[in-house]
Image (cartoon, coloured by chain):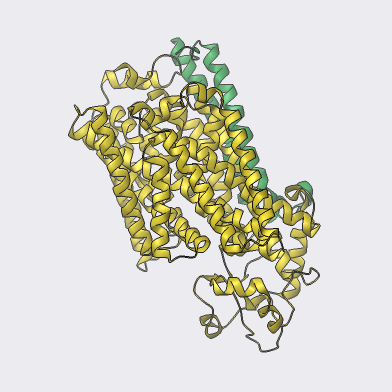
Amino acid sequence: MSNQEKHWEKSRGLLFITLAIWFVFSIGIFLFGAEMNEVTGPFGYPWTYWFTCQGSLGAFVILIFWFANRQEKIDEEFGFSEREDE
Amino acid sequence: MIKGKFIDNLPKVYGIYTGGFLAFIIIMAIGEQMGMTKYAIGVCFVAFTIFIYALIGWLSRTAQADAYYVAGRQVPTVFNGMATAADWMSGASFVAMAGGIYFKGYGYMALLVGWTGGYVLVASLLAPYLRKFGCYTVPDFIGTRYGGNLARFSAVVVLTVASFTYVTAQINATGTIASVALNIDFQYAVYIGLISILLCSMLGGMRGVTWTQVAQYIVLIVAYLLPVFWISNKMGAGFFPHFMLADEVARIGELEQQFGFVKNSAADLATVPKGLAGITKAHSAVNATPWAFISLALAMMMGTASLPHVMMRYFTTPSVKAARKSVGWSLFFIFLLYSSAPMLATLSKLSLIDPNLSTGIIGRSIADVQSIDWYQNWNEANLMFVSDFNGNGTLELNEFFMGGKAVVLATPEIAGLPYVISGLVAAGGMAAAMSTADGLILAIANAISHDVYYKIIDPKAETAKRLVVARVLLVVIGFAGATIAAMEIQGILGSVIWAFDFAMSGLFFPLVLGVWWKRANRQGAIAGMLGGLAAGTWYLVWVRTGGSGFLGITQLTFGIFGSAVSLVAMVVVSLMTQEPDKATQKMVDEVRVPSGRTILGKQ
């Protein structure tokens, strides 16, 4: 397997992990919206309400930065990262 | 004067700008104390901010294609994030979102999740790869990846349908705010709004739009957050509302129990002015089925990843790496406003319905409420209405009606903040609507000038001629949008949601599979774009004309059906026809690694 194929395999792996986390916060938890709202969550808000207001939104922000860092590491590992002068 | 040195000095330039803007607010506040009229304050806020944007637009003028189409590809990560946030947050986000949450609660908050979660898809599936491609427009990517004029043209069609649906709503919003602030007819205010929009984009293209959008972001975020924090402190609800409103949310739930949601008779409701709504849904309880919530969120997320005016912002970053990070910053800046909207809705609702608060009106006598100053103003503006349906002389929860816009526009006044805050909010709403309209008009005009005129009609055209065509198109599209906006066909929010559905129907899978599936070919992409758009449009028309729909897909989520058809059509047709040639497959391989020159830079 060539260097580029390995790079792409690893990038694809990262994509699947990223999308799985994305799925949990955008879709997964809202399957149980009614049940989860009965429980008190962060700062005293009901859980589901808190996720729609802040929780999921914040999770997405962190997820994107985490993804960007991981992808950069993968690019570096296989020597595909950009040089500054390009 | 803007090159090199300007880029290095960005934090300083915008730091001074922010300081100047805050000083302007303080001067206005002093002016108010010294007896400036409300009208004068409103005019000053709108005129001053538009003047600044126009000045930036003029300073960013350019005669280079690279600067006009992609701002010279040198916009730093964080600033591109701010520009994208302004590009993204439209009049609907600024003016209508808190109102939607106020009236519809949980079911509506799917939009919050959808309009943020989509950025994960943008960051992981598309933005870095399209940046590596080095295209000027989204159809540029489709046209080069799949090859052929028909594929390119189909992408232009989908882009135009989606963006045009969106832009009329934004011009409508600028017109609404201009007509209130400047006290002129909506029909004329629409064109004033349009001219302000064109001033930002015509001379500098993407470069002008980028630097005005950063300026507009600063105005709109100050205008949104300042009142939220102020009201929260004034009510004693907590000095940092986002972390401290749990008691208020619970209190609203209690009051809802106490008052109950009384259903009004049809005859009573007929007397309520059009466009106003009462509080009929619980504030924080789960009031939608999981599928209703998830399908709306999903449609908005996939639409986000397909809307060209957002995608093209990531063409302006210096590198692929910067494009990825920039998506994170965009969402961070969007998060600041979106996480505040539910807090504003909570504060606004509680201050009106809690009888223990001095601002509460439920439970007071109707005559009392009708004699309040702000009630009279907003009633006159057709945004507030009370009526004694049961004839007991007291205002009940079901007898109070308000327009969605009033939650953002009127709450500062209701909570007893000085009028200068209301002027600030008007300027913020204007900034939000203008920045989005600019991005959209530019996306359409660039696609037509670059992809249809330059790439298809006259590939030998000189740069100067191309840019003239681009600017003429900008004006023509702007006026077409304003003309339709002046006719006031649909509401702001409805048409914004439709735009997402159109975009995802036609573009989501052709874009994503262009990067992630080598086997995707021209025939498949064309089938996917046109089939998806046609299927989505058909579903919308069918449901609008009395069709029952299926699987719980409504006219707000028709993109789910459209994009499903698009996916199937694209895969089936691709597999039935020949696989792409070696050169195309090699191109896809190169898109997948960040290093090396851009694809189009090589040709």
Apparent side of residue A65 relative to residue B139 in the rendered image (left or right): right
Against B537, is B511 above or below? above
**Closer to us: A53 or B440:** B440
Q: Position of residue B27 (x, y in %)?
A: 66, 50
Please give the letter of the chain rendered in green: A
Query: Which image quadrant is residue B14 in?
Result: top right
Spot the residue most to the front.
B34
Residue sitting at 49 percent across and 48 percent down? B50
The answer to whether residue B318 is visible is yes
Tell me the quarter of the image containing the N terminus of chain B: top left
Q: Does B418 appear above or below B513?
A: below
Query: Among all residues in the image, which is located at the extreme bottom?
Result: B391
Q: Nearer the viewer, residue A4 or B242?
A: B242
Q: Position of residue B415 (x, y in %)?
A: 71, 63
Q: Which chain is yellow?
A: B
Residue B73 lies in what quarter of the image?
top left
Give the percent coordinates (x, y) of residue B166: 41, 51
Q: Which sits in the foreground, B346 or B533?
A: B346
Whether residue B295 can be seen here: no
Image: B444 above or below B412: above
**B98 left or right of B211?**
right
Name the foreground residue: B13 vs B157. Answer: B13
Q: Residue at x 43, y 66 (%)?
A: B185
